Image (cartoon, rainbow, N blue to C red):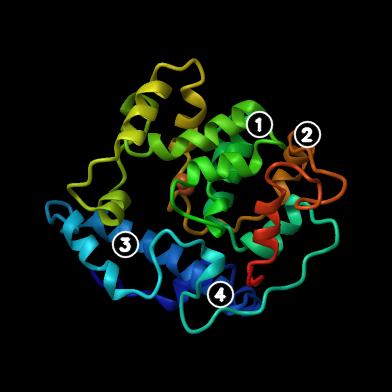
Amino acid sequence: MEIEIDRRAFIASLGGVLAAKAMDHESRADALEDYAIEQLDQVVAEQQGQQERFPTVAELEAQIETRPTRRGVGGLFVARQGNVRRLPPMPAKPTLKDFFELRFAPANHVLQSATRALKTGMSEQIILACLLHDVVQSLIKVDHGWWGAQLFEPYVPDKTTFAIRYHQALRFYPDEAAGYKYPDLYHRTFGVDYVPPPHIEQTYQMVRKHKWYMEPRLVTVNDLYAFDRTAVVSLDPFIDIIGRHFKQPKEGLGNDNSPVAHMWRTIANPDAPL
Ligand SMILES: [Fe+2]
Ligand SMILES: [Fe+2]
């Protein structure tokens, strides 16, 4: 389905013409994609009785050989249009904030998610989990719950790690009592007849009975693309929460010899040939 983008509304959603001009091409492309997803959701919502036709698993599989890259590739490693761009240099001792600004930007989705969690009075561990839950998709998208939890595990509270690891599986299982429905986005992304693989089903069954079930569940409740299309989001409201709960290594992320330091170096320097 083609979506017509209202140029003026899109620019307004970025914070105006000046803000839009200040963004680099890739950030604008990211924002445009987020915006298109929101528009699509809205159009679909407005078409009551007129069901969107979602692709099937077989149709999505047939698209694999139409692309130069696989769908699971990390966002830093592939251009949305044309060629990839030179990345800004990282400071010698990079912090989480540096990674947000120089490698995860514009990070609209996670900032919106954390903003919603903040506004709805979630715990600081959950707000932090919402802020971090998808940023590993810069590195890799496949099984991003596990990759993301691993990336942050040495630095964040256990509940935050748990929430990041298991939000991925819980996304496939509605919990209407908690306010979470199966997303139309997943019908589009995975196919209308998609059945999650056994590791996802088993993980869901385990987490459903776990005393911390609500931690990842609340990430899924806040895992929305369109809760406020005009929101201008930034990392600023989360600096104190990061300060209280994120154990920033003094050597800088990637330089601390932790078991995940190489993952941070890979995000910092995705142009390294080996
Ligand atoms: Fe996710
Ligand atoms: Fe998400």
- Read off the residue under disc 1: 124
User: First in sequence: mark 3 or mark 1?
Assistant: 3
User: First in sequence: mark 1 or mark 2?
Assistant: 1
Foreground residue among 102 and 117? 102
Q: Is residue 121 visible?
A: no
- Read off the residue under disc 3: 40
Residue type marked 3 = Leu
Distance between mark 3 and mark 4 Cα atoms: 21 Å
State the quadrant of the N terminus: bottom left
User: First in sequence: mark 2 or mark 4?
Assistant: 4
User: First in sequence: mark 4 or mark 1?
Assistant: 4
- Read off the residue under disc 4: 26
The percent coordinates of residue 168 (x first, y second) are 43, 40
Residue type marked 2 = Arg
Q: Is residue 44 above or below residue 122?
A: below
User: First in sequence: mark 3 or mark 4?
Assistant: 4
Asked if marks 1 and 2 touch (Cβ < 8 Å), the reply is: yes
Disc 4 Cβ-to-ligand 2 distance below 8 Å:
no
Distance between mark 1 and mark 2 Cα atoms: 9 Å
Distance between mark 3 and mark 1 Cα atoms: 32 Å
Which element carries disc 4, helix, strand or loop? helix
Tell me, for residue 85, which label it has, or none: none
User: First in sequence: mark 2 or mark 3?
Assistant: 3
- Read off the residue under disc 2: 244
Asked if marks 3 and 1 touch (Cβ < 8 Å), the reply is: no
